Image: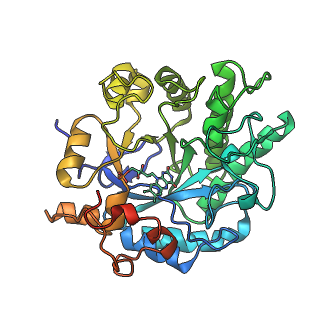
Amino acid sequence: MAKNIFDKVQLSSGQTFENRLVMAPMTTQCSFHDGSVTDELIQYYSRRAGGPAAVIVESTFIDNYGRAFEGALGADSDDKIPGLKKLAEGIKSKGSKAIIQLYHAGRMGTPELNMGRQPISASSIAALRDNAVEPRTLEIEEIEEVIQLFADAARRAIEAGFDGVELHGANTYLLQQFYSPHSNRREDDWGGTRENRLRFPRRVVEKVRAAADELNKPDFIIGYRFSPEELEEPGINFEDTMYLLNHLADYSIDYFHFSINNWQRTSIIDTEDEQLLLKKYLDKAGDKLREIPIMGAGGIKSAEDAEEAIGSGFDLMSVGKAHLINPDFVNQLKNNELPNTFLIDGDDEKLTIPAPLWNILGFLKENKK
Ligand SMILES: Cc1cc2nc3c(=O)[nH]c(=O)nc-3n(C[C@H](O)[C@H](O)[C@H](O)COP(=O)(O)O)c2cc1C
């Protein structure tokens, strides 16, 4: 039967998404200096909740020394729970599931953002970008401690009333750094072979699921976001990604979320290859993976776009920028209204967009696509 964007989607943990569209995680940079929730953040998210099946709250650090941005949101300590609770309530009271994205910046952090601390990573290899800092290699005894930080943050998300977490295994943060042969040059059980590089993300997923079970939340949603390929050499290729997903699938993952800037993305490594990454995935996914919904991302501006992406094989689509421009995006599609495609100067208050986010959105202003 042809899929419709307003179909319900049953997740393996037991919860149901009311439709196939979710609000993509987008960093707003408007938390307090310590990473706790501000009123602005609550207003911004609750204004956008209601239409999408779920709102995925922006990347949220799990370690006080693992931030990647100014104004980043944190779930690194219990004193953040009351604020996170208001945030989850603001989303859920409108009818969307509340999911929070958890990350550790690893080598993408800087001492300036992290109280002077040198960033940590799998190995002491700086990222290939301007001004990247050489990270400190995690001692073997420290690795389980960092894994525990993910489980602790998931426990806080549960206590704050979130329906789930999305583990941020993409965008070159720590989860990806352990899996990547570029950033992980370890020679112990946590590095070297692909099987060893998988160990960190696998343990994180395992411990987060165990944390949910301990709190008697078997229906807690666990999503996993991944970047399908890396340009670094050596780097993650699509075969490596299929290996990762096949193994993570053993831990009741509710959805896999592609981190791509357009759902029609092709390989960034083999630029001659015209096959969509989505099609590559569908060709290679076996029975186990086909049970798990896949969430696409990037470039959805209208009902037609969403229908085409879902019709092409994604089960769910995350919608980012269109939700900034149109706080009621999904309801507009439901009512056959045409969403806007750009921002207009001065609309930040009307659209409930916090200043730090508004200030970086110049590229979405009128006549700039
Ligand atoms: C301002 C902004 C902040 C973002 N922050 C995050 C983030 O915190 N975590 C993440 O996984 N992706 C982040 N993204 C990527 C989005 O989740 C999404 O994949 C991307 O914008 C493409 O979808 P779109 O074309 O619907 O916007 C961000 C994107 C934007 C525009």
**Along the line of sight, the residue nearer the viewer: 117 or 159:** 117
Q: Position of residue 352 (x, y in %)?
A: 40, 77
Q: Is residue 46 visible?
A: yes
Q: Position of residue 62 (x, y in %)?
A: 68, 55
**In terms of image quadrants, where is residue 10?**
top left
Residue at left 72%, top 25%? 191
Q: Position of residue 202 (x, y in %)?
A: 63, 33
- Horizontal arrangement in the rendering, residue 109 relative to residue 317 (left or right): right
- Horizontal arrangement in the rendering, residue 219 relative to residue 264 (left or right): right
- Horizontal arrangement in the rendering, residue 228 relative to residue 211 (left or right): left
Using the image, determine if residue 1 lies above or below residue 336.
above
Using the image, determine if residue 104 lies above or below residue 232.
below
Residue at left 25%, top 41%? 310
Look at the image and tell me in which quarter the C terminus lies.
bottom left
**Along the line of sight, the residue nearer the viewer: 143 or 112:** 112
Q: How is the image coloured?
A: rainbow
Q: Position of residue 225 (x, y in %)?
A: 50, 42
Q: How many marks?
A: 0
**In terms of image quadrants, where is residue 71?**
bottom right
Look at the image and tell me in which quarter the N terminus lies.
top left
Residue at left 86%, top 37%? 141
**Along the line of sight, the residue nearer the viewer: 23 or 138:** 138
Farthest residue to the front: give it: 130
Q: Is residue 64 visible?
A: no
Using the image, determine if residue 360 lies above or below residue 257.
below
